[in-house]
Image (cartoon, grey):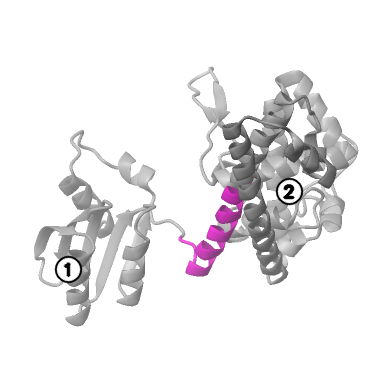
Amino acid sequence: MIIIGVDFHPEFQQIASVDTDTGEFQEKRLGHREEAETFYRGLATAGQKVRVGMEASGHARWFERLLAELKVELWIGDAAEIRAKRVRKQKTDRQDAQLILRLMLKDDFPQIWVPSWENRDLRQLLWHRHRMVQARTRIMNQLQAVALNEGLRSKKRLWRERGRQQLESFRLAPWASRRRRDLLELMDRLNPTIAELSQAIEQEVEKCPAAQRLRTHPGVGSLTALAFVLIIGRADRFQCGKQVASYLGLVPLEDSSGNRRRLGHITKQGSSLLRFLLVEAAQVTVRSQPEWRSKYFHLAMRRGRKIAKVAMARKLAIGLYWMWSKGWHYEQWTKFGSHAGQPGNRDGVQSNTE
């Protein structure tokens, strides 16, 4: 078997390889994409078994497709853990490739879970809609500013038929009028696109039983439910809700030593999209559920609204994880909770004596 450690860059890759049968060691720098494709296709044509290891990268999709096509085994590792295993203070591309190769040979490579191609493609649907909505929001804010400058404060009523007629009736200077017309045209083009993407998300949720169950939670819509399923991947990857909160970057930074414990802002690791959706969904839940509203205002008075919003998003993420892990709808979740099977909780029902 040939084992290859790859230090991947957008324009090239530095490799360090060893043949476990002959002990032959080789280092090479391959340009993208032609030179790299020729090298790996040559290995596949020779009928040799190949294993490739590399750090997680956001610009290597074509490379992953190539190796999948050639049936080459690919290991993707946690970049932070690989960096922590570096002993020498010098850092070069050659040393990075050698480090990855050495970790693979010692069976100490921090391999991570990789979503399927279908999962990745559906994530693109979520991101595309999210970016389109952000673009529309920026346009709407600019049009609201135009209306305010003309003395019209309609808020959401500006997007109704009468509000739009008022906005279009203002007599503006030539370039201001041109800006208003262009912004309205852009918004008119974005609206049907966003509606089409939203319909596609609804169709994908109908194919996913887990997302349908999560959607039964108050405040959680199809977009949040599908994003949670796609980004978490599998519920059995985590042992408890705290691990899910940490994976999504909803836990505070900690720098503790001895008797001193210091907590900072949340880590913001993981998916920024899912974090945003959980915060938005948690605010809807707060408005509709008295228990959540009471908890939110209690935290807001003590720590401020921003911290309270994040805390409710973390609570929602943990609740969704347990619903998914147990296969429960919201009604079952409220009855049994996440304490099923623990001592002092007969039949999994939480005690109300506290």
Q: Residue at x 67, y 39 (%)?
A: 140
| Residue on which the image places disc 2 | 319
Q: Is residue 120 magenta?
A: yes
Q: Position of residue 218 (x, y in %)?
A: 82, 49
Q: Position of residue 168 (x, y in %)?
A: 73, 40
Q: Is residue 235 magenta?
A: no
Q: CA distance from mark 1 to mark 2?
A: 48 Å
- The image quadrant that residue 107 belongs to is bottom left
Residue type for callout 1: Thr
Q: Nearer the viewer, residue 31 or 19?
A: 31
Left or right of residue 201: residue 288: right
Q: Residues within 10 Å of mark 2 (few under 14, many from 20)?
A: many
Compared to 188, does 73 lie above or below? below
Q: Residue at x 52, y 27 (%)?
A: 254
Q: Position of residue 96 (x, y in %)?
A: 22, 47
Q: Nearer the viewer, residue 343 or 295?
A: 295
Question: Which residue ends up furthest to the top in the rendered image?
Answer: 260
Q: Secondary structure at mark 1?
A: loop
| Residue on which the image places disc 1 | 20
- The image quadrant that residue 33 belongs to is bottom left
Name the quadrant of the N terminus. Answer: bottom left
Compared to 140, does 190 lie above or below? below
Q: Position of residue 102 (x, y in %)?
A: 22, 53
Left or right of residue 352: residue 324: left
Compared to 70, does 293 lie above or below? above
Is residue 23 something that shows in the picture? Answer: yes
Left or right of residue 200: residue 91: left
Left or right of residue 279: residue 34: left
- The image quadrant that residue 85 belongs to is top left
Residue type for callout 2: Gly
Which stretch appears magenta? Answer: 114-133
